[in-house]
């Protein structure tokens, strides 16, 4: 925005001074008009994280052209500090008008009664909610006393699936990606037994909970009694854990954390492992980091399941409005703009982030890109994590438990029972509140 002109300092007395004063009067009038225009523009505060905060500014000129009375002020938050910053702002009544929020954070801010429900605005705007991938949209619906309500709109999506070395698998007779656990296990065994003693079937870093959680979602729920007790010692999770641990017991995966792998892309390129469960950001990373000779030798595929194509986790970031905002109509207008199919396609072109609306995938950059198409298939089969504020702590403890079992520190029976006891203690207050609500 062009700054308002500043009047010059008055000159000497006499006719020259009178002319300067006349100029000053005109300049002051112009300055007043400019100030009135600035004060008339409604400033909308938008907090966003990391790369997204840098890129979204490139999308705003068109929004400003559509809404000349509004100006969006973007504040960038680092992901490592964003959660604490938001909680501090909540405590100090200093939250912005709208924000990018990881969808696993929605339960916490819903429980704080900080978020504005979006159901009525979405209906009034005619926003095609059925165009969103159902499992991703479900992460934005939170239980309330009035039933499930929509507290955010997905901005971009994240899920996990297989990245694999198609050349290594073809060499041992596997032309197609596995669709079942049995097929996947056999392919990993064949890769491991192919004569290369330093080659593994898969990389499953022991400090990454996402692969195990995806396997668990394929079997059932990890929490019980309306998400107030652990169900990790129950048959559903045990089947997932036993399968996960068996991969290590057979020597098909190295028992390493991510920090112990010097460079995932280099090790994938030199063939240390054939499969890797990871997310969409690695499409760009593999294209940048792998040698040109390997660019036709890797592919992506949806996760295999126990008896056929499996589900995976529903992740990503959403756009939310804070209830205490005095500029909710302007904030909603920005959410509508960022949720437009054309805007989502431009956002993908700038960031590589995957759009949550099916119609946005008709852009050639997504529709005609084989690694991306596998994500479109997987997004039709995703499930939300438990919608409780305590989930992220449980998520990490689940993986710590699995690591102890893989390392032989604890048996699976003992470890999962201990995990359930820990979860039950963590969720004790939740059970008390539910019981109190039923009694009233």
Image: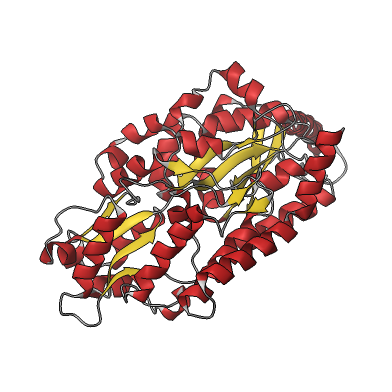
Q: Position of residue 29 (x, y in %)?
A: 79, 29
Determine whether 176 is above or below 293 in the image: above
| Near-viewer residue (369 or 279) | 279
Q: Position of residue 296 (x, y in %)?
A: 17, 58
**Residue drawn at (45%, 49%) of the image:** 219
Determine whether 299 is above or below 353 in the image: below
* Image color mode: secondary structure
| Near-viewer residue (134 or 4) | 134
**Residue drawn at (45%, 36%) of the image:** 344
Determine whether 137 is above or below 278 in the image: above
Q: Position of residue 244 (x, y in %)?
A: 41, 65
Indicate the quadrant containing the N terminus: top left, top right, bottom left or bottom right: top right
Labels in figure, total: 0
Determine whether 56 is above or below 188 in the image: above
Q: Position of residue 186 (x, y in %)?
A: 23, 63
**Residue drawn at (48%, 80%) of the image:** 408
**Residue drawn at (66%, 32%) of the image:** 331
Residue 196: quadrant of the picture? bottom left
Residue furthest out toward the bottom: 197
Asked whether, in this view, residue 213 is left or right of residue 430, the answer is left
Asked whether, in this view, residue 29 is left or right of residue 104, the answer is right
| Near-viewer residue (23 or 169) | 169
Indicate the quadrant containing the C terminus: top left, top right, bottom left or bottom right: top right
Q: Is residue 18 visible?
A: no
Q: Is residue 90 visible?
A: yes
């Amino acid at each position: 925005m062009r700054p308002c002109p500043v009047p010059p300092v008055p000159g000497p007395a006499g006719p020259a001074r009178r002319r300067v004063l006349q100029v000053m009067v005109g300049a002051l009038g112009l300055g007043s008009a400019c100030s009135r225009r600035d004060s008339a523009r409604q400033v909308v505060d938008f907090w966003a994280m990391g790369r997204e905060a840098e890129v979204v500014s490139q999308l705003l000129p068109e929004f400003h052209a559509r809404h000349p009375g509004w100006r969006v002020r973007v504040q960038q938050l680092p992901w490592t500090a964003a959660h604490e910053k938001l909680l501090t702002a909540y405590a100090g009544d200093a939250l912005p008008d709208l924000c990018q929020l990881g969808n696993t954070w929605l339960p916490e801010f819903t429980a704080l009664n900080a978020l504005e429900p979006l159901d009525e605005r979405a209906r009034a705007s005619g926003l095609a909610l059925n165009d969103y991938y159902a499992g991703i949209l479900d992460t934005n619906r939170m239980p309330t006393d009035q039933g499930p309500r929509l507290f955010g709109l997905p901005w971009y999506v994240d899920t996990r699936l297989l990245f694999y070395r198609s050349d290594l698998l073809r060499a041992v007779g596997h032309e197609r990606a596995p669709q079942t656990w049995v097929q996947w296990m056999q392919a990993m065994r064949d890769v491991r037994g192919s004569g290369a003693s330093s080659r593994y079937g898969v990389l499953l870093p022991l400090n990454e909970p996402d692969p195990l959680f995806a396997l668990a979602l394929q079997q059932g729920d990890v929490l019980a009694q309306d998400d107030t007790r652990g169900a990790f010692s129950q048959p559903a999770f045990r089947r997932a854990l036993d399968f996960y641990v068996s991969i290590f017991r057979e020597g098909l995966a190295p028992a390493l954390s991510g920090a112990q792998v010097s460079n995932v892309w280099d090790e994938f390129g030199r063939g240390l492992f054939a499969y890797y469960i990871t997310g969409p950001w690695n499409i760009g990373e593999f294209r940048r980091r792998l040698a040109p000779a390997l660019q036709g030798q890797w592919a992506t595929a949806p996760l295999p399941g126990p008896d056929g194509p499996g589900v995976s986790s529903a992740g990503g970031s959403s756009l939310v409005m804070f209830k205490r905002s005095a500029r909710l109509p302007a904030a909603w207008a920005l959410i509508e703009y960022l949720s437009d199919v054309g805007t989502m396609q431009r956002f993908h072109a700038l960031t590589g982030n995957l759009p949550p609306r099916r119609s946005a995938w008709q852009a050639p950059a997504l529709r005609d890109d084989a690694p991306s198409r596998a994500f479109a298939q997987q997004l039709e089969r995703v499930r939300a994590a438990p919608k409780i504020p305590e989930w992220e702590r449980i998520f990490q403890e689940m993986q710590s438990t699995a690591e102890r079992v893989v390392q032989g520190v604890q048996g699976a029976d003992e470890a999962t029972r201990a995990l359930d006891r820990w979860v039950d203690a963590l969720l004790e207050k939740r059970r008390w509140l539910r019981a109190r609500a039923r009694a009233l």
